[in-house]
Amino acid sequence: MDQDADPELAELLARTEEATTAFMRGEMDRYLELTGHVEGFTLCNPGATRSSWS
């Protein structure tokens, strides 16, 4: 997809890249500024199994 053809998509991808970088660096305040999580949202470990969620 040509990002130049859709400026809104390009902005979303840039913000997502910045948020991911902040998350990986442990900069959670910056990550949360860039992402729109609802109240009560919990980010789970992607390697977690259902039995480990309790």
Image: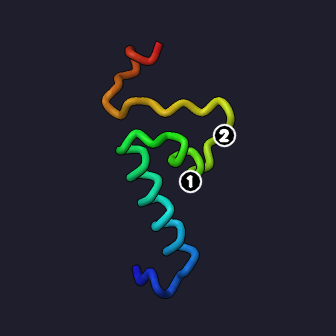
Q: Few, some or many C-alpha atoms within 10 Å of disc 2 (few <14, some 14-19, many ≥20)?
A: few
Give the colouring mode of the picture.
Answer: rainbow
In the rendered image, which residue does mark 1 sit on? 34
Question: Tag 1: residue type?
Answer: Leu
Name the one closer to the observer, 53 or 18.
Answer: 18
Q: Would you identify the image quadrant in which residue 49 lies? A: top left
Q: Position of residue 33 (x, y in %)?
A: 59, 49
Mark 1 element type = helix
Q: Give the quadrant of the N terminus.
A: bottom left
Mark 2 element type = loop
Q: Position of residue 34 (x, y in %)?
A: 56, 53
Q: 18 above or below 3?
A: above
Q: Which mark is residue 38?
A: 2
How far apart marks 2 and 1 lie (CA) works out to: 13 Å
Q: Which mark is residue 26?
A: none
Q: Position of residue 39 (x, y in %)?
A: 68, 34
Residue at the extreme right:
39
Name the one closer to the observer, 43 or 19.
Answer: 19
Question: Tag 2: residue type?
Answer: Val
Q: 32 above or below 3?
A: above
Name the one closer to the observer, 27 or 52.
Answer: 27
User: Which residue is pictured at 47% across the width and 53% down the height?
Assistant: 19
